Amino acid sequence: MNVPTITLNNQTQIPQLGFGVFQVPPEQTADTVTKAFEVGYRHIDTAQMYGNEQEVGIAIANADIPRDELYVTSKLNNSFHRPDDARRAFDDTMDKLGLDQIDLFLIHWPLPTLYDGDFVSTWQTLAEFVADGRARSIGVSNFQPAHLERIIAETGVVPAVNQIEVHPYFTNEEARAASIRHGIEIEAWSPIAQGAVLSDDTIGKIAAAHGKSISQVTLRWHVERGDIVFPKSMHEERMRENFDIFDFSLTAEEVETIAALDRGADGRRGPNPDEFDYIPG
C-alpha cells in the first residue's frame, strides 16, 4: 500500500503517515521499529528526549531498505537550546541514528519562559544544518502563533512543519491556521488523544458505517484534513490497523462532525506550550 506524500515548502516530500516511538522503551525500540518496517512504514519519528535514537538507528542499519525510501525525524532536547549546545546535540543525534543526513530536525518545544525567552538563536542554529547539508528540512514542534511569527520575522526562515497536539477533542485551530498561513505543514501528535477517542460514540457510529475501527477513522480524519500523522503502537496487529487507512474516505459531513467534538483548551492532553518549561535532569 502506497502512503501519500505531502510536498513541504522547500519542495521535499514527506510521507503523510509515519510511525512514532514516543514512550517506546529503548530496549524494545529496535524490534518495534523493525516490525513497523515489516508492516510498511517508512517514516519514523523520534526525539532526543525519547532516549531511543540509537535503537532507531540500529533498526535502520539492519533493515534492507534503501535510504532514499526512509524518512527520519528527530527533535532537539530541551536542555540544548543554546547554539553551541544545539550543534553538539545535533552531532550526537546523527551519530546515534548512524546517518549522514536527517530528513527533518525540529525544535521540540519553544520554552518561552526559559533561555531569556530566546528560541530565535536556536532556530538560526538549526538553519545551519540545512546549509551544510546534514538536514534536508527543519521545523518546529509545539510552536504557538506568536512563536511562529517571531522566528519568521527575525530570521526569514520558515519552518517546514509545526508538530503540534491535534486530535478530535483538541483541534488546535489557532496554531493550525497560523502554520497554514505561512505554508507550514501540520504534524499531529497524540492523533487519537492518547486513546481517549477510542470510546467515542460519535466516531464509533462513523466507524461502523465504514466497517473500520475508531482509530482508523480518526487517523483518516487527520489525513483528509491534511495532517501528517505518526501513531505509536508496540503491537503488530495495531500497527497494521493504523496503516490500513487508505482504502476508504470520509464524507465532508463526517469530517465536520468529528471536528465538532473539539473541546477547546479543555481537550488538551499535553502541556500548554506557552507555559511548558521541562528541562531533563
Image: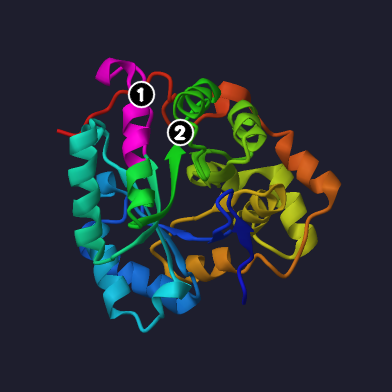
Q: Quadrant of residue 176?
A: top right
- Residue type at tag 2: Asn
Query: Mark 1 sits on what residue?
Result: 276
Placement of 259 over or under 203, stated as above or below = above
Which residue is at the front of the view, 48 or 38? Answer: 48
Q: Residue at x 32, y 32 (%)?
A: 122
Q: Is residue 129 left or right of residue 71?
A: left
Query: Mark 2 sits on what residue?
Result: 142
What crowding class fits label 2: few (fewer than 14 Cα within 10 Å), some (14-19), or many (20 or more)? many
Q: Residue at x 25, y 49 (%)?
A: 90
- Residue type at tag 1: Phe
Figure coloring: rainbow
Name the mark nearer the viewer: 2 or 1.
2
Q: Where are the magenta residues, as a range?
A: 108-126
Disc 2 from disc 1: Cα separation: 10 Å
Circle 2: element type: loop
In the rendered image, residue 254, in percent from the top left (x then y), is placed at 80, 47
Which residue is at the front of the view, 197 or 98? Answer: 98
